[in-house]
């Protein structure tokens, strides 16, 4: 896989919660869990299952930082 984003973090799927149209995929990236909100169709297309090794691709323009 080639991608222009440089914020690719390897991890393992620890939970998948599907809703009416959207799924929350929780990924353990070394003791920290990040959650991706993707369509149920994307979960099916990727054949995602708990325990899968995946990469979380984080778009820098969508990351917010707060203090205090």
Image (spheres, rainbow, N blue to C red):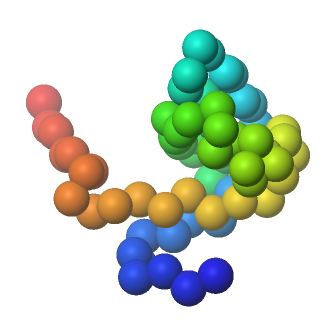
Q: Is residue 47 left or right of residue 9?
A: right
The residue at 56%/22% (across/down) is: 21
Q: Residue furthest top?
A: 20
Work out which quarter of the rendered image holds the N terminus and state it. bottom right
Quadrant the C terminus occupies: top left
Is residue 40 left or right of 35 when viewed as pictured? right
Q: Does residue 22 appear left or right of residue 5 in this picture? A: right
Front residue (pair 64, 37): 37
Does residue 35 show up? no
Above or below: residue 36 compared with residue 19:
below
Could you tell me residue 16's position as x and y percent? Answer: 72, 30
- At x 64%, y 32%, the residue is 40
Quarter-wise, where is residue 33 in the image? top right
Image quadrant where residue 53 sits: bottom right
In the figure, is residue 6 to the left or right of 35? left
Give the residue displayed 53% in from the left and 38% down from the top: 38
Query: In the rendered view, would you say 63 is above or below 23?
Result: below
- Measured as percent of width and height from the top left, residue 55 is found at 63, 63
Q: Is residue 62 visible?
A: yes
Instruction: Write the residue at 25% across / 51% down.
Output: 62
Circle count:
0
Residue 56, quarter of the rendered image: bottom right
Residue 4 in the image: x percent, y percent? Answer: 40, 82
Relative to 56, is 43 above or below? above
Decide which of 3, 44 is in the foreground and name it: 44
């Amino acid at each position: 896989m080639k991608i222009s984003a440089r914020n690719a973090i390897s991890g393992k799927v620890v939970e998948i919660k599907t809703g009416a149209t959207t799924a929350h995929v929780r990924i353990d990236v070394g003791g920290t869990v990040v959650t991706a909100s993707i369509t149920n169709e994307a979960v099916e297309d990727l054949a995602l299952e708990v325990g899968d090794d995946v990469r979380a691709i984080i778009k820098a323009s969508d990351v917010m930082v707060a203090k205090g």
